[in-house]
Image (tube, helix red, strand yellow):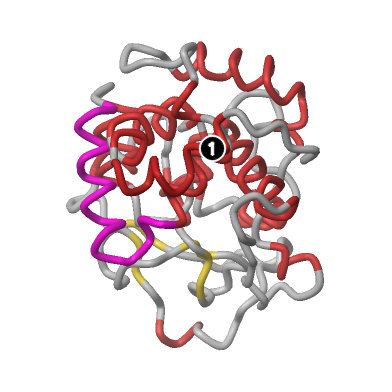
């Protein structure tokens, strides 16, 4: 899934970032005061270093081309999936946090186990491991027997539809980052305590966004390869694998 939302990049409404800028997405300092994408403006919202991350400049991501369609970035607040009802690879263009792991190693190279190890290392360094573990167990990814290391994006979409119906196709970033509902500059969210209705809803929204980005299978394998096999986290959260929540 996309990394945690943070401050604006250029005129972009939402930039999901947790690592220092300068890896694949670069900030234009003179534009830092613009925090809202205006679909009518033709200015670049961000730019991509095609030498450093060439795969992000190639199909199906085409981030240089995506950069020209600012309105597409604007709409991610309300709808991440593509207009064709399938996952939207271009949604990755605004966040470089998981370009090496989830995008390159899992989606492109079809090596989700390798991506899981890379992502775990990154999350541990960022202190995001407990939240990821909570997500894995609340969404029952640890018990998901429909996804494995050989699952394709297309097959994962079918699993998403089976589980969430067409709701994943209508999910936007603000379904997880609820601060965006009131203020385009407010990228806050509260995951909630494990077992709470809020936590179940947040975990489900996070999964639906992964479906919309074409990385749902990456998330499931990530969970299975890491937190699901961690005794400390199993002791803490495994009870939610059989918890029948009322979350929608």
Left or right of 143: which side holds 164?
A: right
**Image height of 88 relative to 181, above or below:** above
Q: Which residue lies at the image location 24% right of the left edge and 64% below the top edge?
A: 125
State the image coordinates of residue 236 (x, y, percent, origin top left): 44, 49
SS majority, magenta: helix
Q: Which residue lies at the image location 61% right of the left edge and 64% below the top edge?
A: 42
Left or right of 77: which side holds 126?
A: left
Say which element carries label 1.
helix
Q: Which residue lies at the image location 68% right of the left edge and 21% below the top edge?
A: 163
Which of the pair 27/106 is nearer the observer? 106
Residue bearing mark 1: 239
Q: Which residues are magenta?
A: 112-130
State the image coordinates of residue 218 (x, y, percent, origin top left): 39, 30
Mark 1 neighbour density, 10 Å: few (under 14) some (14–19) many (20 or more)? few
State the image coordinates of residue 212 (x, y, percent, origin top left): 60, 34
**Image height of 155 relative to 163, above or below:** above
Q: Quadrant of residue 127?
A: bottom left
Q: Quadrant of residue 229?
A: top left
- Does the stretch in magenta take in 113? yes
State the image coordinates of residue 161 (x, y, percent, origin top left): 68, 18
Q: Quadrant of residue 167?
A: top right
- Does the stretch in magenta take in 128? yes
């Amino acid at each position: 899934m996309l990394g945690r939302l943070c401050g604006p990049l250029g005129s972009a409404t939402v930039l999901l970032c947790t690592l220092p800028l300068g890896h694949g997405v670069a900030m234009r300092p003179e534009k830092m005061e613009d925090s809202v994408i205006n679909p009518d403006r033709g200015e670049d919202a961000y730019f991509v270093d095609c030498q450093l991350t060439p795969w992000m400049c190639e199909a199906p991501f085409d981030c240089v081309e995506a950069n020209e369609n600012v309105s597409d970035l604007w709409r991610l607040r309300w709808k991440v999936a593509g207009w064709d009802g399938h996952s939207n690879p271009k949604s990755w263009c605004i966040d470089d946090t998981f370009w090496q792991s989830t995008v390159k190693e899992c989606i492109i190279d079809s090596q989700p186990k390798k991506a899981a190890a890379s992502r775990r290392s990154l999350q541990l360094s960022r202190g995001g491991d407990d939240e990821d573990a909570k997500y894995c167990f609340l969404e029952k990814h640890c018990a998901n027997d429909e996804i494995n290391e050989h699952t394709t994006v297309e097959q994962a979409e079918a699993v998403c539809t089976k589980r969430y119906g067409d709701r994943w196709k209508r999910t936007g970033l603000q379904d997880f980052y609820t601060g965006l509902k009131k203020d385009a500059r407010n990228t806050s969210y509260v995951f909630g305590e494990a077992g709470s209705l809020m936590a179940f809803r947040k975990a489900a929204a996070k999964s639906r966004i992964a479906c919309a980005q074409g990385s749902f299978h990456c998330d499931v394998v990530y969970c299975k390869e890491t937190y699901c096999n961690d005794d400390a986290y199993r002791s803490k959260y495994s009870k939610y694998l059989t918890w029948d929540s009322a979350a929608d």
